[in-house]
Image (cartoon, grey):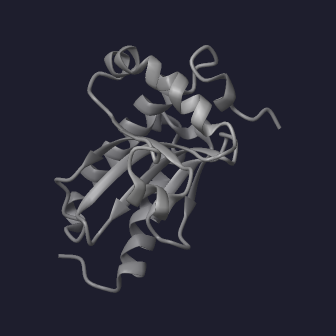
Amino acid sequence: MKTGSFPEIYEQFWAEFATRVRRPDSGLSELALTVENSRGARCYVSKFKMEQKLEAWWCISKKAMRVQVVLMDSGAERLFDRLQQRKEHIESEYGQPLVWVDPRKNPKKAKNEGKTYFIQTDNCNCEPLKEELWIQQQRWLMTTLRRFYDTFATVDRMPDLRLNQS
């Protein structure tokens, strides 16, 4: 069982994750993943526009992991609606149902998150304090990030989510 403060555990988990992701054989090395330790629990594909993120999330207290597309700019509502029109096709391509969080339909979420839209999948069967399971959890995050990227970052599907060319 891993001991230490949550910030220390988050820092160690994400440092190990960042090392794995940057390996040439990771399948993610070209995605320019940024690990953000200020809140301890996130990493994101930094090649995406700043107002649109592909994000991984790992929470000790909830014993959960999540990968999600986050849409939060002025065009988020329009883009979310366009994607939702293709929901069945997108989920078929992804290989399983996804959770579509629309703040217009959830006033409590809208109050907390503002006009932020999420398309996500969760893994609630993790034990963050069991360090011996971190490799398995990190593999799930890596595989799921890659699947999300392949599903959502296509130019024909999400022209507003194209990779930055700068």
Camera-nearest residue between 18 and 76 = 76
Q: Is residue 161 above or below residue 55?
A: above
Residue 114: x and y in percent read: 55, 57
Q: Residue at x 16, y 53 (%)?
A: 125
Outermost bottom residue: 4
Is 107 on the left-hand or right-hand side of 75? Answer: left
- Name the residue furthest right: 166
Residue at 56% in and 73% down: 38
Position of residue 165 measured from the top left corner of the image (x, y, whole percent)? 79, 32
- As displayed, is residue 111 above or below residue 88? below
What is the tally of numbered marks visible in this picture?
A: 0
Is the residue 97 above or below the residue 49 in the image? above
Q: Is residue 3 left or right of residue 70?
A: left
Residue 163 image-quadrant placement: top right
**For residue 36, which quarter of the picture?**
bottom right
Residue 35 in the image: state x and y as whole percent: 55, 59
Quadrant containing the N terminus is: bottom left
Q: Is residue 80 left or right of residue 159?
A: left
Above or below: residue 12 compared with residue 19: below
> As rendered, which of 145 and 131 lies closer to the eye?
145
| Image quadrant containing the C terminus | top right
- Measured as percent of width and height from the top left, residue 46 is found at 64, 47
Left or right of 121? Residue 39 is right
